[in-house]
Image: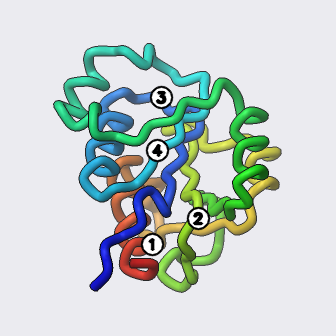
Amino acid sequence: MPSPAPHDLHIALYQPDIPGNAGAILRMAACLDLAVDIIEPAGFDMSDRALKRAGMDYLEMAALTRHVSWESFAAWRTGQSRRLVLFSTKAAAPYTGFAFAPGDILLFGRESAGVPDHVHDAADTRLTIPMRAGARSLNLALSVAMAAGEAIRQTR
C-alpha cells in the first residue's frame, strides 16, 4: 500500500468553543497526517493550557493553519480548489454513503451553535452522522474522528 499523501485531507473547525476538543483533534490529526484549519475567532485563547494539555507533545507535529475569519478561510479554499464537506445535524445524507476524495476539507461547526446559514450554504455537500431518535449530537472530537476515519479509508 502506498504511503498517504501528506495532508491530502483537511479538518476545518469553525470557531471552536472547547479547547480540549480542539487539542484532541490536533493530536489525532498529527498522528494520522491530516491538516487542521481553525477558523477564528475561537471561543478560547489559542495558547490556552487546556489546548496544549489535550494535544500533549503532538502539537509540534500538527499541521495547523489559523484563518482570521470565515472570509479568509473561504478565499484560501477557493484558491486551493478544495471541496468543502460540512458535517451538520441539519443534513440528511449520511457520511457513510458519501464518496470522499483526496483534498476534501471536512468542516465542523461550533460545539455550541454549529455554523451560520452563510457557511452552511457555502458547503459543496452536507453530511450527517446518523444517530438514534432523540439524540442531539456527538462530542465534536468523536465526530471528527469518525468522519476522518471514513475519509481516510476511502482515499488512502
In the image, residue 87 lies at what x, y percent?
57, 59
At label 3, the amino acid type is Asp
Q: Earlier in the sequence, mark 1 or mark 3?
A: 3
Disc 2: which residue: 104
Residues at marks 2 and 4, CA–CA distance in whole angstroms: 12 Å
Query: Badges 2 and 3: C-beta atoms under 8 Å apart?
Result: no
At label 4, the amino acid type is Val
Query: Badges 2 and 1: C-beta atoms under 8 Å apart?
Result: yes
In the image, residue 70 lies at what x, y percent?
72, 35
Q: Quadrant of residue 145?
A: bottom left
Q: Earlier in the sequence, mark 2 or mark 3?
A: 3
Who's the residue at 62% across and 77% down the image? 93
In the image, residue 113 lies at what x, y percent?
60, 38
Secondary element at tag 4: strand
Q: Earlier in the sequence, mark 1 or mark 4?
A: 4
Residues at marks 2 and 1, CA–CA distance in whole angstroms: 9 Å
Give the label on residue 151, or none.
1
Disc 3: which residue: 17
Residues at marks 1 and 4, CA–CA distance in whole angstroms: 14 Å
Quick check: 19 left or right of 57?
Answer: right
